[in-house]
Image (cartoon, rainbow, N blue to C red):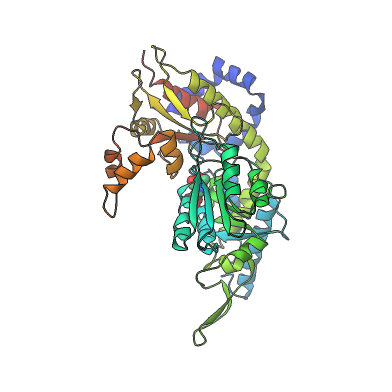
């Protein structure tokens, strides 16, 4: 069945839509409709209900046309050279850097964007280069993405300590007092890195950006994972000044994939020690003398050839976001998220038991439009997230299930204790498959369902999703 077609008729003309518009006047329906028709009509033409923007954003048609036109009219050479086509490409690379800084209101005197393959790559550059030594500390929030969690393997190698600050169900927030204590605990003489997500890709919780100043005041360096935050929220680096910020551009505007940035304070970048060098990262290297000199600034961190044919599309994507208006997108997705959260919490089986349980804030304050939940039957038993996904797939609804590469939030939300986890993992050999893990942690649901809204989301998407959830209701 095509969920969208049914919804378009029932959703649009129905009382629900009127009620939604009254409850959420910030939705700006005309703008949403015009954008959808102009740039994202393929969603409706192909009958998709796309609800995985935290997984990947969608590109507007004009971005693709504009970039195709650009490529057809340009001759681009490898920017590591100085010939005419190389100069053209270098020019576009530098334009892209300037546009990134401009978009995030980052001063070029203070910040430099290292162009990376994605957010993970930027995070890895910090992990492998941060000068961890014995006695140093890496402080992580429980709801970090695995691409941040993985940094702990670098600190282990160097004898530093990893500490985690927990998030507290059901809201999945961090208690201020616990964070304050951890920030104050270690010595100022150590290197200390605090890494947290501006928005959790599990619960949608937005952690305060004010923590950046507090951590700085206590002598910490701050790595902000902004991958899930920046697609629908403004990050102002003139106001909040972390040492490092990691983003992936496909999450913001769909195309190009394969390009991200580590936006780093110049002084913080100087502190990183590269464990190797590569083509493009040095000024001079000698085989016989066994010496090399790293290039200054971003270049020293950009291994090999940049994705130079796609970088102009980043500039175009940022222009596109600006033309649509990030604040308008924010307001739209939060209206839809508020509506969905209200409807989810009031959805009950005939016997009064709730159909869903949301992991994270029940309202829209200090959260983004990413909602994690599980579905329950009338007896209160969890319906497997895998079953929910299978059913959604049949409706052409794209949502996400599992733990979304965010095991800490998943463990706390689903009530899996450290002991249970240790027991299960200790039984494994050198490797463990996801199926083996599911079997050994039996009885517990080892995942959740996640929907996330973005640039092209509209009321019909929300309505189609709510109708889908309604199918689980037992009379
Ligand atoms: C919060 C967060 N951080 C990091 C990442 C990793 O992004 P990428 O896979 O683009 O490197 C993701 C991806 O979903 C994310 O949501």
Q: Is 164 placed above or below 392 here?
A: below
Q: How many marks?
A: 0
Residue at (42%, 43%) from the top-left corner? 407
- 34, 228: nearer the viewer: 228
Residue at (30%, 39%) from the top-left corner? 438
> Considering the image in quadrants, where does the C terminus appear?
top left
Residue at (53%, 49%) from the top-left corner? 250
- 79, 88: nearer the viewer: 79
Where's residue 282, x and y in %?
57, 75
Q: Is 186 placed above or below 307 here?
A: above
Q: Quadrant of residue 179?
A: top right
Where's residue 411, x and y in %?
41, 38
Query: Viewed as shown, does residue 237 lie left or right of 358?
Result: right
- Visible residue check, residue 248: no
Q: Residue furthest bottom?
A: 288
- Visible residue check, residue 20: yes
Q: Is 344 placed above or below 423 here?
A: above
- 50, 230: nearer the viewer: 230
- 194, 388: nearer the viewer: 194
Where's residue 3, x and y in %?
43, 27
> Considering the image in quadrants, where does the N terminus appear?
top left
Q: Quadrant of residue 391?
A: top left
Where's residue 159, x and y in %?
47, 61
């Amino acid at each position: 069945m095509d969920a969208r077609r049914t919804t378009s008729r029932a959703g649009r003309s129905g009382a629900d839509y009127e009620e939604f518009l009254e409850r959420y006047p910030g939705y700006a329906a005309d703008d949403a409709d015009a954008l959808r028709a102009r740039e994202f009509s393929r969603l409706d033409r192909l009958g998709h209900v796309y609800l995985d923007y935290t997984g990947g954003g969608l590109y507007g048609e004009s971005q693709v046309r504009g970039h195709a036109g650009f490529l057809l009219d340009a001759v681009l050479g490898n920017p590591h050279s100085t010939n005419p086509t190389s100069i053209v490409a270098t020019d576009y690379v530098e334009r892209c850097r300037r546009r990134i800084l401009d978009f995030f209101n980052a001063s070029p005197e203070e910040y430099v964007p290292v162009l990376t393959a994605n957010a993970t790559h930027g995070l890895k550059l910090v992990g492998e280069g941060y000068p961890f030594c014995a006695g140093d500390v890496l402080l992580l929030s429980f709801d970090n993405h695995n691409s941040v969690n993985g940094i702990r393997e670098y600190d282990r190698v160097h004898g530093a300590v990893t500490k985690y600050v927990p998030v507290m169900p059901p809201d999945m927030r961090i208690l201020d007092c616990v964070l304050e204590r951890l920030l104050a605990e270690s010595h100022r003489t150590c290197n200390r890195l605090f890494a947290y997500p501006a928005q959790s890709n599990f619960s949608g919780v937005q952690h305060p950006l004010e923590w950046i100043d507090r951590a700085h005041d206590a002598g910490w360096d701050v790595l902000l994972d902004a991958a899930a935050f920046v697609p629908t929220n403004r990050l102002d680096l003139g106001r909040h000044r972390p040492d490092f910020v990691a983003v992936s551009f496909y999450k913001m505007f769909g195309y190009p994939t394969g390009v991200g940035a580590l936006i780093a304070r110049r002084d913080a970048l100087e502190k990183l020690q590269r464990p190797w060098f590569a083509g493009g990262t040095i000024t001079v290297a000698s085989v016989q003398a066994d010496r090399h000199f790293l290039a200054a600034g971003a270049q020293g961190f950009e291994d090999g050839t940049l994705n130079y044919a796609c970088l102009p599309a980043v500039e175009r994507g940022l222009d596109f976001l600006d033309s649509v208006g990030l604040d308008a997108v924010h307001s739209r997705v939060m209206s839809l998220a508020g509506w969905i959260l209200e409807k989810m919490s009031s959805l009950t089986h005939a016997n009064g038991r709730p159909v869903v349980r949301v992991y994270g804030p029940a309202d829209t304050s200090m959260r983004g439009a990413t909602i994690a939940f599980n579905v329950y039957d009338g007896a209160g038993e969890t319906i497997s997230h895998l079953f929910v996904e299978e059913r959604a797939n049949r409706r052409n609804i794209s949502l996400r299930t599992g733990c979304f590469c965010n095991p800490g939030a998943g463990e706390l939300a689903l009530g899996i204790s450290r002991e249970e986890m240790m027991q299960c993992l200790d039984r494994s050999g050198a490797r463990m498959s996801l199926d083996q893990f599911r079997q050994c942690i039996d009885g517990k649901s080892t995942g959740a369902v996640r929907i996330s809204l973005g640039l092209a989301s509209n009321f019909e998407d929300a309505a189609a999703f709510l109708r889908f959830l309604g199918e689980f209701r037992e009379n």
